[in-house]
Image: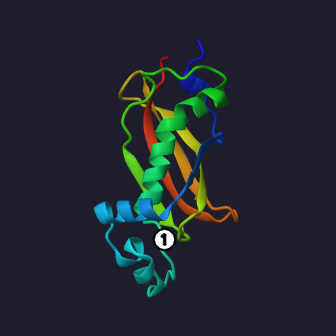
Amino acid sequence: MTTFFDRIEIGMMQELGSYTFEADEIIEFATEFDPQPFHLSQEAAEKSNFGSLCASGWHTLSVWMKLNIKNGRSEFSRLVGAPCPETLFGPSPGVRNIKWLHPVYVGETIRYTSEITAKRKNPKRAGWGMVLSHSQGFNAAGECVMKMDGAVTMRTDI
């Protein structure tokens, strides 16, 4: 029997969607989670090395997570050509190598992707494995604004 896990191939690219960062959302997120002056007001940002209001890197990663949850399952289904089971995913052991490479300014739309980089079955826990990925966000100019490496546990027996 070919399982969903078996159909996942290294190099598969998930298109997770796009998001436009607006001033009010940038300020709202920053007020709650990253209250640095260049995220809180245009005036303060103009005095910083950014020169204009920009989104927190944590905000850009939070949007990645939102789009990953919203569209990741359907993208897996599209890529492997089979419905993605509801019980497929387990917890993530975490992310590594988070990098914010370019600021995300008000009005910019970021397109998010996630590429499968590895997979393996868990020799100590039957029916489970791990899928590793490299995720990125790109602005309209095609510049990578953020990237990270992640992993998620996944059922291997369905």
Above/below status of 37 relative to 18: below
Q: Label 1 amino acid? A: Cys
Say which residue label 1 marks. Answer: 54
On the image, the x and y values in percent for residue 136 come to 57, 55
Q: Is residue 114 visible?
A: no
The quadrant holding residue 92 is top left
The quadrant holding residue 79 is top right
- Display coloring: rainbow
Q: From this viewpoint, which residue is outermost toward the top?
A: 1
Residue depicted at 45% across the width and 22% down the height: 86
Above/below status of 40 relative to 157: below
In screen coordinates, is 98 left or right of 13? left
Q: From this viewpoint, which residue is outermost toward the right?
A: 141
Q: Nearer the viewer, residue 38 or 58?
A: 38
Residue depicted at 46% across the width and 61% down the height: 98
* Dot 1 alpha-carbon crowd within 10 angstroms: few under 14, some 14 to 19, many 20 or more: many
Q: Nearer the viewer, residue 47 or 127?
A: 47
Q: Is residue 28 visible?
A: yes
On the image, the x and y values in percent for residue 8 come to 60, 31
Q: Nearer the viewer, residue 24 or 113?
A: 24
Above/below status of 85 relative to 72: above
In the structure shown, which secondary structural element does the residue marked by tag 1 occupy?
Answer: loop
On the image, the x and y values in percent for residue 145 come to 57, 64
